[in-house]
Every structure is written in structure tokens, then in C-alpha cells.
Image (tube, rainbow, N blue to C red):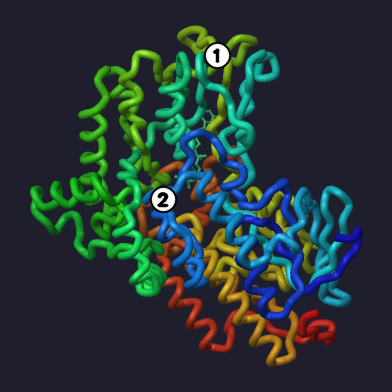
Amino acid sequence: MSTTSEVDVVVIGAGFAGLRSLHTLREMGLSVAVLEAGDGIGGVWFWNRYPGARCDVESYDYSYGFSEELQQEWRWSERYATQPEILRYVEHVADKFDLRRDVHLNQRMTQARFDEEDSRWDVTTEDGIRCRATYLVMAVGNLSTTKAPELPGLSDFTGRILHTATWPREGVELNGQRMGIVGTGSSGMQLVPIAAQRAEHLTVFQRTPNFSVPAANALLSDERDAEVKAHYVERREAARWSPSGLGFKPNKQSAKEVSAQERQETYERAWNGMGFGFVLAFYDLLLDQESNDTAADFIRAKIAEVVHDPQTRDKLMPVGFPFGAKRPSVDSGYFTAFNRPNVALVDVRSDPIEKVTATGIRTASGDHPLDILVFATGFDAMTGSLLRPQIIGRGGRTLREHWSAGPRTFLGPFIAGFPNLFVIAGPGSPSLLSNVLLSIEQHVDWLAALLLRMRENATEVFEATREAEEGWVAHVNERADATLYPKAQSYYMGDEMPGKPRVFMPYVGGVRAYRRILEKVLADGYDGLALTAGSGMVRTGS
Ligand code: NAP
């Protein structure tokens, strides 16, 4: 890429969203440049290389559905794919569709400014590359700006400090090490069982015990593979019209309308085979507190069954918030790891961290000597990577200003005052409450259809109207307020970052309802979007 270049579309990020955007938009004859901060493709799957990292959506669903040839030829080995296997898949897709030639690695976008004179985005990277484009597609992911707690004394630590989301590519020797893990979200819960086996001693520093359900992972047999592939098109279509984009049917019953025995049996079946789908064991688990309590009690009883030490068991019990309202984890042996003699649990609410010392962590109760300190503390979720660069829209207004009270969008992708900017699977859309891969593909297809329509109509600029944005923000809040989600402290609400506005960010109405809304907007001639000629220079690709 030359220092200054001009393309139809600049895409930020070369993860699943960025690569799919590149493929589809290039097929339309548009010139596309993908700018990626990392030195490899794959997004979260490029960065999150900690031992145990795997997806908790089934491989058959957490994969692209746009190419029948691709989905038939790729052979997943496990029901839930590991990070290395997913990265191999991404590399395969990039090679198959010749994507790499338009991906520019090591290019972190620092600024994007909308030039109102000729309706173009001016994009600048840390390296000083300047790129001018008609359209700017933000494919930056919802969980990509890491969060490390600023513990006092951290710089005094003489051992190794790691974050699960920036795990060294060459791996880390854990054997014989005294290891500490801060954080027990999905990443921490996946790392703990493996660290427990390898490290000489493991201390887990937990702030909030969370709910988790077993992954029920398994190798995929040739028979199973053939069975899925024989009906892959139908499976994808069913997922597109399901509540969360997963490839199985949700239960339409309420947890309260069945007998205690039937409820128990339903939970047992879900527990032993549905992984993350456990949240759909009954349709009202996130709508009705009483129904939710039945699921929460079931999971707490399961934890109590496996953890031997009564004090550790008590500390691991998730209480005080509804099951599922804070993202539950899907684990393989997390709770049983605490039965090992080399694993200790520190509850930092009752035994707070005072400081990091040269040799470990000091809590109120004493010193915990460590050679390796791992932060599994997650991300500045959903808005972190959208607000880190400076995005400047009409009238010099920044996105940070526009979103000072929380993210405001029309349908998710569109932001009033930021023409020709499209955010893929971000705030205001099902995003993190869905199979995000399916949501990514939905957005890219929808963007492609919009750009085709605009090309036919000789318009070049799309922009959400203020009224449409206002209406969508109200709708997103209204739907969230009708659920149990706001009752938990979670990254869905912005609770993970001190000072972040407390607003429910994803769209909770479900994948199916959201698809209907997008279809209606399209049928109504893109109601809510102003489509204009812009500078009058309609380009048809290069
Ligand atoms: P996370 O869910 O946000 O968990 C962060 C953990 O760090 C929480 O336990 C949090 O405690 C703790 N923490 C944060 N700041 C702290 C502090 N100052 N002191 C002590 N503890 C602190 O992050 P994550 O585990 O990386 O997972 C993020 C998301 O990535 C997941 O929810 C999931 O969507 C995705 N993910 C998916 C998979 C998968 O597909 N299997 C795997 C990994 C991640 P609090 O709860 O008290 O805030």
C-alpha cells in the first residue's frame, strides 16, 4: 500500500467480519483495503492464544455460511473448535478466496475524518499511511480492546505478566511454575483447568463467581459430519430465523409451566449436551425471575456436587444476579480443578488484593508467591475498539462525543452524523447475544444489498436520520428493560470499565426479530436512512 491511496471501501479489522466484508464487497467490483493492527489475520482468534481457548458455539455454526463449497470441504474435528483450529480455518478461507492481497497488516487506524466537501473518509494509521475512501466499515470486534486492572505495585513484580488476550505466540512454559490468574470470566474459566494440570501451583483470584455450564465437547465422527453436511443449507436457514443464531430449536415452554420433575429432566438434558444452549432450556429464563431461579438453583446444585472443600464451594457459588444476565461460561472441568491439591481460590471481595509485590500478590490474608501472573480480566467491551481511534463525523463531532452517554445507533450499523460509516455486529445489534458469526454475515449481506441499491439509484451517501436513531435507541432500551439482563453487573451494561455509561448495549430482541426488522427497513425503501448523491461523483468500482 502506498503512503496515500484511494479506494471505494476501507475496512478496519481482518477478523471474521473484515474478511467477509472484503470478499463480498470485492465481488461487487468495489476496491477494498483492509487495515489490520495485528501482524496476522483472524481477529480475536489471532490474539487469544491462551491454553484452553476454544469457541463455545458449535463449529458447524461458528463458521461462514456464504459458500456451500467452503462449508462442504472444511472438516471440523471437534464439536467446539479450539483456537488453533479456528485460526487454521480463517487462513484457509483467506487463501481460498485470495483475500490476503488486500489486507494490510500492522496498520492500526488512529483517525478517520469525514470530509464533507466531497463525502469521503480520510483514514490515517499509526504508521502514517493515509487512505481515502467512500465507505468506512468498522469490523473491529466487540471484545478486542483488552483490560488489565491497574493493581498497585504491578511494576514491582519480577515474574512474568501476561494477558489471556495477548498470549505470546510461541506459548508459555507453565510446568513447574507458580501461577496466578486474576479473573474468572470465560477466558479464566477455560485456562484454569489446563493451568491446574501444568503449573506446580495455581492461585485463582476471583471477584465475582459466575455461572458456567459444561461444554459437552466431543470429537466429530465422519457420520456426524456427513449428517450435518447433508442438510447444511437448512441448518443455516434455521439458525438465521432462530432467537440467537444457533443451530438448534429453542424450547417454547416456560420453566414455570412444567412439573418439577419435567423441569429437572429438561435441565439435565441441557446440562449434558447443549453447552451454551442451556440458556434456551426454557424460553423465559431471561424474562422471568422465578423461572430464572430454577435454572440458577440447578446450576448451584451441580457446582455443590463436584467441589469437595466446603469453603471453596461457598466461594464459587454465583449468587445475587440472574443466571445468564452476565455472560455465563461454558467450561471443561473448571469446578473440579479446585479439588486438586495444587489449586487455591482467593475471593478478592472478602480478601482484597492490597498490592502486587516483587514476588507475588499480597491480599489482606497474606502473600501469594507467583512466578507468572495472568490477567484474564477481559475487555473494554463493545465500544472499546470503536472509541479508541478518533472518528470524526459531520461538523467535526467525534464519535466519543456522540456516544458520551452510551452508544447510539440506528439498527446497529448506522450512526447519525457519521455518513457512509457502517459498524458490523456492534452495539445496538444482536452481536454478543447471538452467534456473532451469523450476525456478521447478515450485516455484510445487508450492506452489500444497500450499496447495490444505491448504485442503481445513483446515490452515494447513506446516513441515519436523527429521528431513526432516536427511535432505535429507545427500542433497544425498551427491549432490554423487559428482561432480566439489567439486573446483573456485566459488560453488556458497560460495568466492566470504571466510568463507562451504564447502558444496555446489544439488541436483546433476538436474531429472528432483528432479521424481520432489517427486512422491513429494506422493503420500506430504507426508511430511516437518508440516501443522497453526495458530491455527485458516483463511482462504480475500479
Ligand atoms: P470477562 O468475561 O469480562 O471476565 C473478566 C474477569 O476478570 C471477570 O471475572 C472480572 O470480574 C475479572 N476482573 C476484571 N477486572 C478485575 C479487577 N480489577 N480485579 C479482579 N478481577 C477483575 O472477560 P473474558 O473472560 O476474557 O471473556 C470475555 C468474553 O469473551 C466472554 O464473555 C465471551 O463472550 C468471550 N469469550 C468466549 C470464549 C468462548 O467462546 N468460549 C472464550 C473466552 C472468551 P467481575 O466479574 O467481577 O467483573
* Residue positioned most to the front: 222
Identify which amino acid the numbered label 1 is placed on: Leu
**Residue under numbered circle 1:** 370
Identify which amino acid the numbered label 2 is placed on: Ser
Foreground tag (2 vs 1): 2
Residue 5: % across, % down: 88, 66
Tell me which corner region of the image, top left, top right, bottom left or bottom right, holds residue 445.
bottom right
251 or 247, which lies in front?
247
Mark 2 near ligand 1 (CB under 8 Å)?
Answer: no
Residue 387: % across, % down: 69, 52
Left or right of 459 in this view: 116: right
Q: Earlier in the sequence, mark 2 or mark 1?
A: 2
**Residue under numbered circle 2:** 77
Q: Residue at x 73, y 72 (%)?
A: 419
167 or 535, which lies in front?
167
130 or 395, which lies in front?
130
